[in-house]
């Protein structure tokens, strides 16, 4: 009697070519896998290189959480909290260290009555190239101690210097993540995080790139030099352009433009 249709006849089957889950793989399968393995590794490595090449360089930002950093200088509260430190080796004889709170709640810092006074501040240092930021506890004053030093060139706010009007195109981002907390800290994938940070009081920055590839990061303020309003939130992480004024305040560059001046491109 012939075998029924669809049923394997063991007598006509080479046992060396059958796959059995608990048995050794058939020789033909082993030969195929060994031959295909080098090509799979080469293809996988090439695809990984291509994907990595398309990603933005996260930059040299650092979040130094393994140590406490101390800075002594004048506490400035407008347009955003910062410590202005006397540093003869730095441009304009001073260095500005932005102050942010842990998490996304910098607006909880109660600093208004201490504006312009010398303090020693302790916290975690965040830095990217020559930009620095100090991360401090949001609901405690232990990080801020009066400093008995004379800082005549720092306590007095430097006179703003207008560098003229400019029309700039770039991306709005939160400066904390960009300085080094997140790498990378810009782009569409960072939109939700950046929006929450700016809503919580983290200073917004305008990242712009010139036609020859150079990049610059400017602290964003309104047209009068005050803190940026929350009206800017819908445009965070999107390609935008705006016409405003570039102003130098000490060693910081500000881009002054109202939220209504920004438009998607």
Image (tube, grey):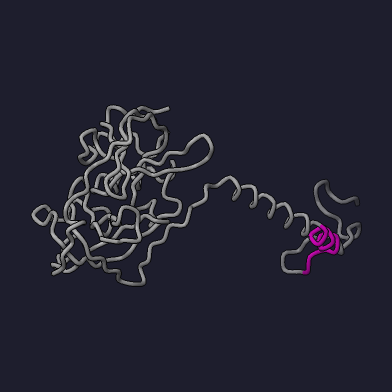
Q: Which residues are magenta?
A: 24-35
Where is residue 191 shown, x and y percent of the image? 38, 42
Q: Is residue 28 on the magenta stretch?
A: yes
Q: How many marks?
A: 0
In the image, 206 versus 184, the foreground residue is 206
Measured from the top left, where is residue 116 in percent x and y? 14, 55
| Percent position of residue 46, x then y | 69, 51
Residue at 52%, 50% (x, y): give it: 57
- Please give the name of the residue rendered at 31% of the width and 44% of the height, measured from the top-left corner: 219
In the depicted view, which residue is nearer to us: 191 or 95?
A: 95
Give the image location of residue 101, x and y in percent.
24, 58
Query: 117 or 35, which is in the foreground?
Result: 117
Q: Nearer the viewer, residue 249 or 169?
A: 249
Residue 193 vertical position relative to residue 83 in the rendered view, above or below: above
- What quarter of the picture does the C terminus occupy? top left
Instruction: Please give the name of the residue rendered at 32% of the width and 32% of the height, measured from the top-left corner.
Output: 164
- Residue placed farthest to the bottom in the image? 67
Compared to 145, does 101 lie above or below?
A: above
Q: Is residue 248 left or right of residue 36?
A: left
Q: Is 247 placed above or below 4 here?
A: above
| Picture residue at 23% right of the left edge, 48% below the top | 201
Q: Which residue, as the protein is rendered here, is positioned at the far left?
A: 113
């Amino acid at each position: 009697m012939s075998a029924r249709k669809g049923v394997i006849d063991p007598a006509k089957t080479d046992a060396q070519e059958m796959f059995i889950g608990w048995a050794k793989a058939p020789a033909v399968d082993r030969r195929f896998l060994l031959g295909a393995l080098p090509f799979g590794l080469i293809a996988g490595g090439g695809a990984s290189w291509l994907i990595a090449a398309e990603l933005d360089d996260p930059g040299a930002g650092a979040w130094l959480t393994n140590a406490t950093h101390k800075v002594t200088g004048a506490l400035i509260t407008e347009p955003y909290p910062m410590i202005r430190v006397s540093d003869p080796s730095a441009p304009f004889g001073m260095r500005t260290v932005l102050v942010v709170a842990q998490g996304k709640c910098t607006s909880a810092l109660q600093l208004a009555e201490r504006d312009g006074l010398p303090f020693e501040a302790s916290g975690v240092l965040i830095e990217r190239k020559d930009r620095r930021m100090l991360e401090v506890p949001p609901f405690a004053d232990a990080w801020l101690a009066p400093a008995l030093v004379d800082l005549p060139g720092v306590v007095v706010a430097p006179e703003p210097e207008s560098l003229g009007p400019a029309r700039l195109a770039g991306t709005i981002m939160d400066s904390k993540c960009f300085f080094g907390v997140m790498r990378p800290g810009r782009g569409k994938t960072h939109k939700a995080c950046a929006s929450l940070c700016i809503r919580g009081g983290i200073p917004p920055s305008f990242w712009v790139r010139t036609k020859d590839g150079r990049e610059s990061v400017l602290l964003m303020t309104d047209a009068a030099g005050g803190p940026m309003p929350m009206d800017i939130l819908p445009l965070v992480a999107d390609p935008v352009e705006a016409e405003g004024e570039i102003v130098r305040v000490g060693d910081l560059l500000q881009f002054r433009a109202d939220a209504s001046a920004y438009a998607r491109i």
